[in-house]
Amino acid sequence: MELGCGLFGLASELEQDSEQTLKQLAESGFTAVEPIYAFRNDPALAPDSPVPSFVRTLLWDEQKVRMMLPKLNEWGLAISSMHIGLSADIKEDDALPELISFSKKTGIRFFMTSLEFDTLEKCRAAARQLDYANQILNPHGIHLGYHNHYMEFKKVIADGRECTLMEDFLEHTSDKVMLQLDVGWQLFGGDDVISFMEKYSSRIFSVHLKDFVADFASVDEKDSFAAVGDGVLPTEKILNQIPNLPLIPHGLMIDQDRAAKGQVLLSDLKKGSDYLRTIILALNQADRNLIGLDN
């Protein structure tokens, strides 16, 4: 089973021992990782940057990617995609040519960004931005998808009807703009994950799984996380939707931001990986029984 892992939550572990952390992910059943791409002019990499060192550990520039690819291959890991930040300090007209050059050198073709829009005005601006970026990138075989958090599922009145900001975003972007659907944050935002996946299946090319405790709405956010399979995410129903999605290679990923309360994140990730494999094996067996392959 191809299963990726987002690296965002592992900043401290990667700073302490990046190679051992990545090897442990491979030993836990993961086949790919998703780092954060660092643009050449990313202010976070400046010597006087106030960004903590453990956060900078997550930022992989072209040199680091090219250095890490042979090691990742040795450990049985690929880079499924990379997250990018399009901040005020990183202009699209500089960033997009850089991504094209980087992709040609490394073979990495899938990138994700988050703009965390929480108003209709910001939503429409994000739609224009992603449309423009993909018009430039797609002819080079490169795709920039949108990774959601929970605020994009806020309900608004748009053009006289009620919808979520994410629905409005999809209606105002070309079908070339795909989603990295973080179903955990979607659940956290109060949206119906399965109905959304059924309606927009053709627009989802990556899925991030994160799970939350049953009372996540009433506890501090840092205490709300659970290992995938231990919380209230309808994981089995989500996995049933996966065959209907145009997923990129290793597009199914665990992206757990924090360890469950009192737990260790790498142990949570191993637990989630084991759980997913068990569920997928059970689903595959059910399919075989349904069509009579084992009779």
Image (cartoon, grey):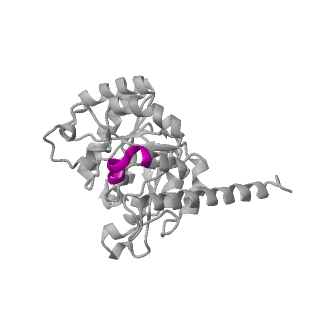
Which residue is drawn at the image coordinates 27% and 48% (left, top)? 55
Quadrant position of residue 132 = top left
Asked whether, in this view, residue 265 is left or right of residue 201, the answer is left
> Is the stretch drawn in magenta largely helix, strand or loop?
helix
Residue drawn at the location 27% of the way across and 33% of the way down: 39
Pick the front one: 74 or 203 = 74
Which residue is located at x 19 percent, y 47 percent? 51
Nearest the eye: 213 or 245: 213
Most extreme residue toward the left is 48
Residue 280, by quadrant, is: bottom right
125 up-or-down from 271: above or below: above
- One can see residue 109 in this view: no
Span highlighted in magenta in the image:
11-21
Residue 38 picture quarter: top left
Specify whether residue 13 is painted magenta: yes
Indicate whether 36 appears above or below 285.
above
Classify 114 as above or below 105.
below
Coordinates of residue 235 in the picture (x, y in percent): 54, 62
Looking at the picture, tell me which residue is in the foreground, 294 or 17.
Answer: 17
Say above or below: 142 vs 287: above
Q: Is residue 266 magenta?
A: no
Image quarter in which the C terminus is found: bottom right
- Picture coordinates of residue 109, whole percent (x, y): 44, 32
Q: Is 232 positioned to the left or the right of 222 in the image?
A: right
Does any portion of residue 60 appear in the rendered image? yes
Q: Residue at x 36, y 54 (%)?
A: 9
Count all numbered tags in the image, as a single digit: 0
Residue 82 image offset from top left, x and y in percent: 39, 39
Q: Position of residue 259 (x, y in %)?
A: 39, 63
